[in-house]
């Protein structure tokens, strides 16, 4: 495999964070312990544990967690012998207070996530993460929705705030391979820090897009066992490891152990198969935030509106993560239009 970086590829396993969306944030402590124990034994590099919407996300708007995320983080740290335990923080949802609490429990890596045009709100949290001795990473969400030049501009801001890597985050699973290539290539040329890539599989391109990102020099890669993540899930970790091995890139994670974990530990956690169904396909097509799927399904039933129409309208309006309350508003408006015969 021809790569434009000599640095080793690190995998961050996100099933216990992004996968929280798929189970309506109902992970138990024992589930987290069993998954972390198996991931750590397989040689996973980083394991992200927090509410699907990051630290502080357990609210009525985003969905209440069954178990306080700090207890889950503490359990993950307790089970991990070599993997770093990571957390996600969205400024405006999570605060420096939650970040300090997670650090005190043993989390050693934080990804500070903002919309692709709003990197400036990450400064306080990235600075604080570095002060706390944490590995600080920038996470530019919905990266398909801004021109490459804007993405570069915002990534450079995160670098100036102390980010040690910046991710191109395909939150909607909407990017096509050539779009991934041009974004990673542009960041590789503009930044002196590592580049990361986080994919969703809504258009069945997660593994392909991830391979393109690695070829172009991305060294921080996200995966999720059995695709356990929002929408149609993320890059399937065990599949990615098998493909990389076939390409001659050994990243030090045991493939057989990852297969066993997927089959016997993660698979029973799935509330439904992580496949590309109508809703997730429409999200990739319309460029809508992947965590909107369950919210749109609920609004569809409540207002008697096709969930596809809700998702397409959300995409048309450019609704982003953090605006989940708009899903109900859009569904209500569409129902009212239908009732009054307005097209």
Image (cartoon, rainbow, N blue to C red):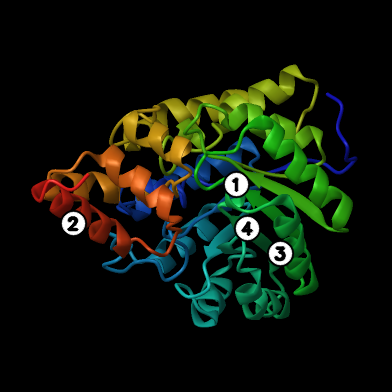
The residue under label 3 is: 154
Depth check, mark 4 against mark 2: the one in front is: 2
Q: Residue 149 appears in which quarter of the rendering?
A: bottom right
Callout 4–callout 3 Cβ contact below 8 Å: yes
Work out whether mark 3 precedes mark 1 in sequence or the reverse, and give the earlier one: 1
Q: State the CA–CA distance, disc 3 to disc 2.
A: 35 Å
Q: Is residue 205 visible?
A: yes
Q: Quadrant of the C terminus?
A: top left
Work out whether mark 4 precedes mark 2 in sequence or the reverse, and give the earlier one: 4
Q: Residue 242 appears in which quarter of the rendering?
A: top right
Depth check, mark 4 against mark 3: the one in front is: 3
Residue at point 47% right, 52% down? 17
The residue under label 2 is: 332
Disc marking residue 140? 4
Work out whether mark 3 precedes mark 2 in sequence or the reverse, and give the earlier one: 3
Residue at point 76% right, 57% down? 152
């Amino acid at each position: 495999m021809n790569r434009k970086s000599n640095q080793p590829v690190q995998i961050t396993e996100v099933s216990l964070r992004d996968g929280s969306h798929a189970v309506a944030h109902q992970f138990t402590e024992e589930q987290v312990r069993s998954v972390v124990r198996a991931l750590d034994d397989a040689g996973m590099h980083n394991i992200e544990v927090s509410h699907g919407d990051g630290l502080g996300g357990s609210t009525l708007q985003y969905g209440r967690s069954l178990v306080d995320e700090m207890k889950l983080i503490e359990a993950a740290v307790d089970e991990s012998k070599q993997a770093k335990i990571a957390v996600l923080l969205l400024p405006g949802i999570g605060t420096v207070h939650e970040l300090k609490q997670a650090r005190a429990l043993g989390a050693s890596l934080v990804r500070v996530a903002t919309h692709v045009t709003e990197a400036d709100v990450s400064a306080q949290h990235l600075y604080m993460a570095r002060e706390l001795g944490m590995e600080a990473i920038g996470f530019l969400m919905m990266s398909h929705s801004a021109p490459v030049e804007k993405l570069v501009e915002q990534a450079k801001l995160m670098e100036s705030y102390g980010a040690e890597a910046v991710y191109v985050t395909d939150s909607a699973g909407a990017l096509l391979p050539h779009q991934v290539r041009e974004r990673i290539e542009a960041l590789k040329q503009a930044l002196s820090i590592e580049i990361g890539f986080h994919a969703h599989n809504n258009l069945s391109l997660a593994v392909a897009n991830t391979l393109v990102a690695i070829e172009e020099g991305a060294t921080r890669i996200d995966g999720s066992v059995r695709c356990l993540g929002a929408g149609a899930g993320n890059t399937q970790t065990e599949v990615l490891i098998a493909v990389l091995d076939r390409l001659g890139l050994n990243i030090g994670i045991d493939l057989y152990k990852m297969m066993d974990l997927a089959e016997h530990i993660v698979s029973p956690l799935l509330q439904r198969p992580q496949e590309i169904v109508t809703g997730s396909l429409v999200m990739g097509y319309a460029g809508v935030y992947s965590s909107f799927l369950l919210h749109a399904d609920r609004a569809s039933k409540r207002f008697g509106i096709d969930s596809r129409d809700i998702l397409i309208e959300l995409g048309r309006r450019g609704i982003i993560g953090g605006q989940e309350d708009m899903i109900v508003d859009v569904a209500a408006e569409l129902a009212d239009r239908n009732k009054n015969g307005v097209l």
